[in-house]
Amino acid sequence: MPTVFTPTIFMSTVFMSTMRTVLLALTAALFLSVTPVHAQTAKPAATAGTAKATFAGGCFWCMEHPFDVLPGVVSTTSGYIGGQKKNPTYEEVSSGRTGHTEAVQVVYDPNKVTYEKLLDVFWHNIDPTVKDQQFCDHGSQYRSGIFYQDDEQKRLAEASKAALDKNKPFSGAIVTEITRAGEFYPAEDYHQDYYLKNPLRYKYYRSGCGRDNRLKQLWGKAPE
C-alpha cells in the first residue's frame, strides 16, 4: 500500500532532508578547516585477485557499513554514478540535474565473499519498492540500483531480483534498476567513512530518516 504523505509526514521528511544538509555543511566546514582543499584519503583500489561491485541505495553514508563488515570486502567508496556530467560535485548531484545517483563502490575478494552475498546484503539494506527515493531522501539522485561490471554480474543481479520477486516478504513491486556501470566518481573526502568519522551525526540522521524502521517493515528486522 503506497505511503500516504500527511502534512506531518511531509514536514518530517523535509526536516530530515534539511538536517542532512546541515550536518553535511558542519562536517565539510570542519574537514576543510583542518585539511587542504585538494587532499584525498586513498582507499584500496581493485587489484589482481579482487573485483568491483557498485550499488545505489540512497544516502551513501548508510551503505558503506553493511559491506565494510563483510569478511572479504577490501574497501567501500562513496560516490556518484549513472549521470552525464564528468567529475560532478555533491552540490551538483544533490540538485538532481546531473542524472547521477549516490552509490557505493565495493572492492572485494571473490575467493572470500561472493557477488551473490553482496547482492543479498544490498537488497536487505534498501527499500526496493520506491522509485527515485530512499527513505526520507527524494529525487533521482537517491534512486536504488545495481550497476553491473560485466555480463556475469548482470546475470547474477537479474537472477537475484527474479528470486526476490518470487519470495519477497512485502507486497510492493520491485523497481530497483539494473544497469551497466558507467564512470564512477568518488565523492568528496568528507563523505567517505562518514559513519566512522561522525558517529553521532550519522546515527541522528539515520534514525531521523526512518531507515531502520522501514527496513524492519520490509524485511522483518533492521540490519545490525
Image: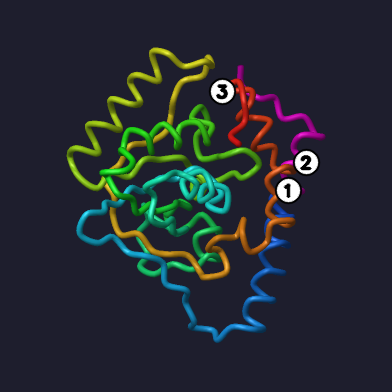
In-image side of 7 versus 38 (left or right): right
Q: Which mark is residue 16?
A: 1
Percent of width and height locating residue 128: 48, 30
Percent of width and height locating residue 210: 69, 37
Magenta-colored stretch includes residue 13: yes
Q: Residue at horizontal 52%, vertical 47%?
A: 63
Q: Residue at horizontal 24%, vertical 39%?
A: 153
In the picture of the structure, the residue carrying the numbered disc 3 is 219
Element carrying mark 3: helix
Magenta-colored stretch includes residue 110: no
Proximity of marks 3 and 2: CB atoms separated by less than 8 Å: no
In the picture of the structure, the residue carrying the numbered disc 2 is 12
Going by the picture, which residue comes out furthest to the right?
Answer: 8
- The magenta-colored residue range is 1-15
Please state which amino acid type lies under the numbered disc 2. Answer: Ser
Please state which amino acid type lies under the numbered disc 1. Answer: Met
Q: Which mark is residue 197?
A: none
Q: Earlier in the sequence, mark 3 or mark 1?
A: 1
Q: Earlier in the sequence, mark 3 or mark 2?
A: 2
Name the one closer to the observer, 170 or 85.
170
- The 10 Å Cα crowd at callout 2, few under 14, some 14 to 19, many 20 or more, is some
Q: CA distance from mark 1 to mark 2?
A: 6 Å
